[in-house]
Amino acid sequence: MSSRETLQPLYNGRPVKAPGLMRHGPFPGSDSAVGHKSLELLEDKLTVQTSDIEKLARENHKLATAHVTLRQELVGAEKEIQTVRAHIRSIQTESDIQMRVLLDKIAKMEASIEAGEGLKKDLQQVHMEAQGLVKDKQELTFQIQQATQELNKTESDIKNLPNLHAELEDLRKEHQRLRVTFEHEKGRNIEQVEQMKATEMNLIALAREVERLRAEALNVEKRAYAPNAYSGAYTRLDPSYPPHMPGANGYIDIYGRSQVVMAPVVSGDSEISHSIDHGSAPAETSAGVAAPIGNTAAWETRFDPSIPRR
C-alpha cells in the first residue's frame, strides 16, 4: 500500500506513465548528462515500483486465496444451512415456536459466518455453558450423596423405632410413677403446711399472752414502788400478781439493778414464781416474745402444762 501512496515521478512537470508506456532513450530537449542522471533516478524508481508491484501481487494472491477459502467455507456453510433446513422440514412433530427458534438460530449462524468472529464467541459461550454444566453435575452429585446419607440414617432410625418405643414407654411409666409420688408428697406438704400454720398461730397467741402478763407485771411493779401520798398500807389491785414476801427486801445485782423477790402463787397443782428486774425494758424480741437483756433472766416462769391456755 505504501507504493500506491508514493508520488508519481515527474519530468519537466509531466507525469510518467506506466512502465509499459514509458519511452526509452533520452527525452527531447535535454542534454546527455542530465538525461543520464534522470535515467538512473527513473531506473531506481522503476525498481522500487516493481518491488511494490510484486509485493502487491503477492498480497493480492494471498487475498484471493483467502477469498477463495472464505467462499468455500461460505459454500460449506450454505450447504450445512440447507441440510439443516431440510432436516427442519423433515421434522413435522415440532411446534411452530421451535421452528421459529431454529430459524432464529440459523439466521444467527449465517450472521456469525458472515461476521467471521461470531463463531469464536459462540464457541467460548458453549465452553462456559459446558463448565457450568460440569459444576451443576458436581453439585447434583454432592446432593445425591447427601440424600443417600440421609436415607441410610433414616433407615437406621426406622430400625431403632422399636427400641425408641420401648424407651418411650419406660419414660411414660417413670413419669406416671413420679407424678404419683409428687401428688403424695404434695398432699403431705399441704398437711405439714397446715400444721405449721396452726403451730404458728399457737405461738403467736402464746407470745401475746406472755406480753400481756409482762405488761401487767410492769404495771404492778410501778404501783408497788410508787410513793403513797396517804401513808396507807399497800393494796394489791391485781389478785393474780404474787404478793410481796414479808422480810424479802430488794437487793442490788452485780449490774446495779434492784431485784425484788415475790412470793410464789399456788393455783391447784401449778406453781409460778416471778422475778422482776427493775432495769430497762428489753429492746429485742424473737418470734413475738421479748428477749431478756444481758445474761440475767428478766422473766422466769415455771409453767405447768396441765393448766389450760386462755
Image (spheres, rainbow, N blue to C red):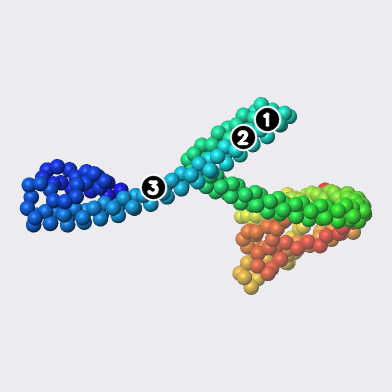
Location of mark 2 (residue): 82
Which element carries disc 3, helix, strand or loop?
A: helix
Q: Label 2: how many residues lie within 10 Å, few (<14), some (14-19) or many (20+)?
A: few
Location of mark 3 (residue): 60
Badge 1 amino acid:
Arg
Residue 220: % across, % down: 69, 54
Residue 243: % across, % down: 76, 58
Q: Which residue is nearer to you in this view: 149 or 163?
A: 149
**Mark 3 or 1, closer to the camera:** 3
Which element carries disc 1, helix, strand or loop?
A: helix
Q: Could you give the CA–CA distance between mark 2 and mark 1, rounded to whole angstroms?
A: 10 Å
Q: Residue at x 78, y 61 (%)?
A: 301
Q: Which residue is drawn at 65% across and 64% down?
A: 293
Q: Which residue is nearer to you in this view: 53 or 143?
A: 53
Q: Could you give the CA–CA distance between mark 2 and mark 3, rounded to whole angstroms?
A: 32 Å
Q: Which residue is drawn at 63% across and 33% down?
A: 85
Q: Label 3: how many residues lie within 10 Å, few (<14), some (14-19) or many (20+)?
A: few
**Mark 2 or 1, closer to the camera:** 2
From the viewer's perspective, tell me whether residue 187 is left or right of residue 33. right
Location of mark 1 (residue): 89
Badge 2 amino acid:
Gln
Q: Can residue 210 be seen in this view?
A: no
